[in-house]
Image (cartoon, helix red, strand yellow):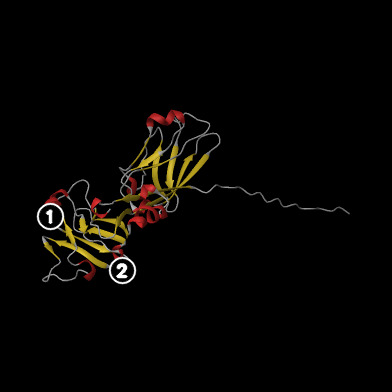
Amino acid sequence: MTLHVNILINTCFYLPAPKVIKVEKGSDVTLPCSLWPKKDLRSTQFVWEKTDDGQKVFLYDKDERPGQSEQFKGRVSHFPDKLEQGNASIIIRNTRRADSGEYRCMFPSIQKPEIFYIYLVVGPKVITVEEGCDVTLPCSLWPKEDIWSTWFIWKKTEDDQKVFLYCYGDLYSVKRPGQSEQFKGRVSHFPDELKQGNASIIIRNTRRADSGVYRCYLPYIQTPQEFYIKLVVGEYFDVTVKDVLSFKDWSLVSTLLSSCCI
């Protein structure tokens, strides 16, 4: 009698977790991708894709080919002077919230194809301020665009509070009600800078309750835009130590401490 034994061998492949990069919305970010040992990439194809939605981010190839996703057109570049050292990193400029996600850098044509993964998190600009101080929440168009004859609105997103409205020269007032009680008499804009595309506001005498995420929305310009700011209001110790460290990423933190409040 012949006994046949089938042996099942499970092979496990370990894939390291992708490197996480956090960046403030609107800033530029470098997504690293380098071969080791170094290999001259000047005549080697490499591709960057956003894996969660299949978008084509960047292609380096001797033959230029169309296909880059609309979201990334005009915003992505590589390092041509570093190709010889095996550097296939890219820069994404003027990052958007929609850029958040997993990215894959691939070298399909080398002898042992290699793949690198990066996870990008694009978050709101974080501003920390001591309670009782005034704070500027920035919102500026680039390239500059005259917004004097249009309108924009600021809201606090968590509780949908109406913070500030500019409407063709009119503001929240008795004739134009709607501003949330918490912000009445404490918020102003920069009227002299509207023609330079500046929709920033100042919140005076900040309170703990002002902490949260704010949205600046310009719906009626040529390309509607929105900006997000996270404001943290606390006591001096909280702002300089506890709240700042809780973000665990200095690139996301802008600490504004007015001398009048120290």
Could you say whether the residue bearing mark 2 is in a helix, strand or loop?
loop
Front-most of residues 182 and 44: 182
* Residue closer to the observer: 179 or 92: 179
Left/right of residue 205 with respect to residue 88 in the rendered view = left
Image quadrant in which you'd find residue 85: top left
Residue 87, position in %: x, y? 44, 34
Labels in figure, total: 2
Q: Is residue 210 left or right of residue 31?
A: left
Q: Nearer the viewer, residue 159 or 8?
A: 159
Q: Residues within 10 Å of mark 1 (few under 14, many from 20)?
A: few
Residue that appears at 26% across and 55% down: 261
Q: Is residue 187 above or below residue 47?
A: below
Closest to the observer: 3 or 60?
A: 60
Q: Residue at x 35, y 50 (%)?
A: 253
User: Residue 93: image x %, image y %?
Assistant: 32, 43
Q: CA distance from mark 1 to mark 2?
A: 27 Å
Q: Is 90 on the left or on the right of 219, as rendered?
A: right
Assign the N terminus to one quadrant of the image.
Answer: bottom right
> Which amino acid lies under the numbered mark 2 shown in the image of this protein?
Asp
Along the polypeptide, which appears first: circle 1 or circle 2?
A: 2
Residue 39 percent across, percent down from the top left: 49, 30
Q: Residue at x 24, y 59 (%)?
A: 217
Amino acid type for the residue under numbered disc 1: Pro
- Label drawn at residue 199: none
Which label number is shown at residue 191?
A: 1
Q: Which residue is pictured at 34% across the width and 46% down the height?
A: 72
Residue 159 marker: 2
- Disc 2 crowd rating (10 Å Cα; few below 14, some 14-19, many 20+) is few
